[in-house]
Each structure stands twice: as C-alpha cells, then as structure tokens.
Amino acid sequence: MPDPVTLAVLQARFTAIVEEMGEALLRTAYSQILNASRDFSIALCDAEARLVAQADHLPVHVGAMPYAVKAVAEAFAGDTHPGDIFLVNDPQHGGSHLPDLTIIMPVFDDGGTLRFWSVVRAHQSDIGGATHGAYNPSATEIWQEGIRIPPIRLGQGGVVRPDLLTMLAANTRLPRDFRGDMLASVGAARLGEKRLQEAFSRHGAAEVSEAAIAILDLAEAEARRIVEAWEDGSWSSEVLLDDDGRGNQDIAIRATVTKQGSAITVDLTKSDPQVASFVNSSYANMRSAVAIGFAYLLDPDTPKNDGVFRLLEVIAREGTIVWAAEGAPVTLSTNHCAQEILEAVVRALGQSCPDRAMAAWGKRFRIAITGRDPRRDRPFVWHLFHARPGGGASPAGDGWACAGEWQAAGGIKFGSVEMAEARFPLFFEKHELRPGSGGEGKFRGGDGGELRLHVETDAPTRGNTAGEGARYGATGLAGGADGLPHHYVLKRADGSERVLLTKETGIVIGPGEVLEVKSGGGGGWGPPEQRDPEATARDRRAGVVA
C-alpha cells in the first residue's frame, strides 16, 4: 500500500483525470444534449471493474457503468488489447437505456498488464427507433426504442472503425451529431488512458493499482463508521409512478430496507410487475438508483465509489417494474422509475438517520420537438431542458430552485436561452421561476420554472413527451408539504388549449402555436409553522412566494 502522502496524491489525481475527461467531452461534443445540457458521465474502474473515481456529472449513470465494464470484460476475455475501443448500450449488458452509449477503453501498463478501464457514458440526441429524440412513449418492446448494441469492438489501436461508425450513424436521425458525439466520447476515453499511463510512469503501475484498492477500502471504512451510528431496524416505503402512458395508474415501487450495524439490505421484490411501457427499469439502472439513494444519506465528502457500495445487499425480482425481463422497453427508466427507486430507499432508510434525509425533488417532464430548421434547411431535434423542476428541501435548508431531477442531482444543465435560440428555430418569450411551486415547510422546496416557447418554422413540427409528475408533485418530508405538479399546455392558433400528457407521441405544433410549461417544485421539509419568520419575509420580498 502506498504511503499516506502518495495515496492522497493519487486519489486527487484520479479525480483530476475524470474531471479533465469531462471537460474534454463537453468542449468537443456536437449535440445540445452534451455540450449544453451535460447529459454524460465519466468514470475510472480498476481491472476488476470496480468503480474507483467519478466526476460530478450524473449519479444515475455512475452506479450502472461498472456493469457495462464487466459485460465488456466478459465478452472479450482473453481478447483485450492496448488501444481497443469498446462500445455498449444494451440494458442486458450493463446499459441503463439505449440512448446512453458507453465507450470503454482498457488501460495497460508497459508490461502488458491490464490495470484500469477508462469509461465514458453519453446520451445521444437520437438513437433511431419509432420516434425522434431517443424516447418512445408508445414502445411496448425494446426494439421499438432504437438500435441495441451489445459489447462490440468499435476500434483498435486507438482508432475507430469508420465502417462501424457509419453503420451506427445511419440508424439515427441526426448522423452528423451522432458521429461527432461518438468521436468526442472516444477522445475523452483516450485522454483517461493517457493520463493513467502518465501516472504509471511517475509512480509505477503497481503502486497506482494498489492506491486504487486502498482508496476503495478507506471509503468502505468511512461509510461503515457513518452507518454504524444510525438506528438499527427495518422500514418500508412505497412510491408511485403517475402512470405508464397506457392507462395503468399508480404503479408502485416498494422498498423494505433493513439496517443492522453497518450492513444494509434493500428488498424491492414487492414492487409491481413490469408494464408494456418505457417506465420499466433495467437491472444496472436499478442497482445504480439504489446506490445513489444510499449515497445521498452519507457525508458530502465521502467518496462515492465501489467501497461505499459494498455495504449494500440488493434483493430484486426479474419481471418487476424495477428489473424488467429482456425485451421490455426501458428508455424512461434513467429518470423514472430511477427517481422512484431512490426515493423509496431514502424514505425507508432515512428513518434510520432522519437528520440526513431530504424531501423529494421535482420530476422529469421532457418534450422533444423535431422539424426542419428553415434557416439552415436541415432537420433538427430539440430536447427541453429549460424550466427545470425544483429540488427538495432538507433538514439543512431550502431546496434549490430549478435544480432538476433527484437522480441527476443538479448535474443536468439547461444551458443558455440565447444559445438555444441561435442553434434551433426557437423563441423563448418567457423563462423564469414559478413562484410558490415548492412545497411549504420549515424549509421550503425549491421552485420550478415557467416557460413560454414559440417554434419559428413555416411548417408544423412534431413533438413527443416523456416524463412523470403531472398527477403527483414531489412529496414533502417530516411534515413538509408536497411541491406542485407539472402543467404543460399547447396553446393553439385558434385560441384553444391542449394539456399535454407526460407520455405521448404525435403532438403537432403548428405555426403560431405556443408551448407553455410550468414545472413542479420540490417537496418541503418540516412543519410550515416552524419556518423562520425572517425567511418567510425574505421569500415575499424576493417574490418566490405566490
């Protein structure tokens, strides 16, 4: 094991590497969803596919990425070489959902020993399938959602095979963006490989590997120290999905969490059966959602790596909403039911440590609009990331306004209105906070946003929606009130209005019609009557209370 100083240096170096990889991807990606909204994650895994380091991107990706690495390692056992570039998105092989393409590169030392894996997971603006935008609310099976990629070797010697890249791009509606984003992801993974090999040269490959093992062991010890102070016991919770978009409402995710000493068991076997809809979860996505629900209860500076997750035993049943059988659609699951899974974990395990548990965050309600940009005479797909929902309040303070969904923890950004207008045929008439949408409490939930949007095309455009939270707002905790639910309306040219559902396709947006969005707020924490009067007065002065 390295001495303490070297260990600290290498831990900081791992963190610096994943952060630099993320910056490289951000600055070289083509699509809005990556270079503005930052829907990607970066990780380093050791030779055994254990998560060693991650950047502060999307928590829901990170817990799933080691499963993709394991799938690649198994598929190419004995046939992995320096410079190999692997690709996978299949939920049966560690993928979260089809739009998230994972680039994985092995990192060898000079002696030919595999030491690490450099991993990049990036969401694509389109992945084929029956409808644009990578989410298909009408899907009843995975083959309707897009191209499915089990572990493949995308390139060798650090070079992508152009024929494979062309084939993959041909299966999307935005081949230019797809090619650019894929090459940006490969570049980020190669940067991780390069930086690790530089660390080998400076410290020795064996010492760097030993440091990774020590970092995991220390994180485990720290997590056990924290958890041992919590109350022992067993608690259950139930969190509901609004619907599956096919007439079934109140689909339940049920968790029973048992804590004994520093061991935690999460049992999800009583969750409802899977449905013929994209709200089902893949296995890797479910494991990630459980992991981040637990991680949210730890100290902020506790490393979130494989060592921490050793405390967890997860019991689930294939064929349920949290672990759908092969062939089921799962595309929405990185949002919902991932958020419902992590909320069920927090609401149950949080009873063991009530001073650490926070109220629920607002949910995802995304619309994707496609048409032809008259300014450039080429097709476009735009994803709504503006007017984000509010974050949940906690025992430590108010929730953040427009923080986004819980499973992203603020990692998704909405980007510049002006940049969106420059890149797409859009005009944002309004983009501001939605006062009073956060749940009341001793600490208020963060407010959601409001948006009024015009699509500036001569011909009608088409939209589809994918989300949750139009029936139920984010739940409060410890006596706090729920946040308001979402409300999306399409205002027709004839003056009529159409309320948009959270899961529908075939929405026609004609010239002169306006999309109005009111996103939900986060849940409040604690009884509202306990709120500091000065805080209430400050809210009124700031205009954040209706």
Image (tube, rainbow, N blue to C red):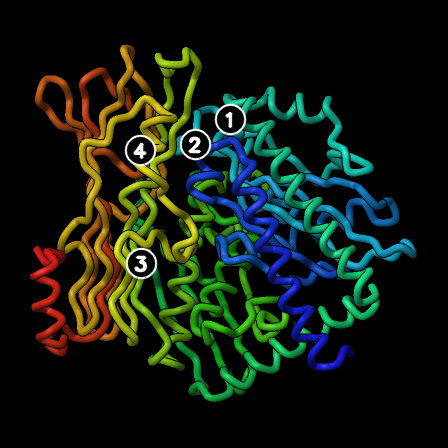
Name the residue carrying label 4. 418
Q: Residue at x 16, y 75 (%)?
A: 527
Q: Earlier in the sequence, mark 4 or mark 2?
A: 2
Q: How many marks?
A: 4
Q: Residue at x 52, y 64 (%)?
A: 291
User: Hey, which quadrant is residue 437 in on the image?
Assistant: bottom left
Q: Label 2 vs label 3: CA separation? A: 24 Å
Mark 4 against mark 2, which lies toward the viewer? 4
Q: Earlier in the sequence, mark 1 or mark 3?
A: 1
Name the residue carrying label 2. 136
Name the residue carrying label 3. 361
Tell me the element at label 2. loop
Mark 2 against mark 3, which lies toward the viewer? 3
> Mark 4–mark 2 contact, CB under 8 Å?
no
Name the residue carrying label 1. 129
* Closer to us: 503 or 180: 180
* Closer to us: 231 or 19: 19
Q: Earlier in the sequence, mark 1 or mark 2?
A: 1
Q: Earlier in the sequence, mark 4 or mark 1?
A: 1
Q: Residue at x 56, y 49 (%)?
A: 22
Inspect the image, locate mark 3, and give the three-letter code of the amino acid beneath it.
Answer: Trp
Query: Against 503, is 270 above or below?
Result: below
Q: Label 4 vs label 1: CA separation? A: 31 Å
Disc 4 crowd, CA 10 A, few/some/many (<14, 14-19, 20+):
few
Q: Label 4 vs label 2: CA separation? A: 28 Å
Q: Position of residue 4 (x, y in %)?
A: 70, 81
Q: Which mark is residue 296?
A: none
Q: Earlier in the sequence, mark 3 or mark 4?
A: 3
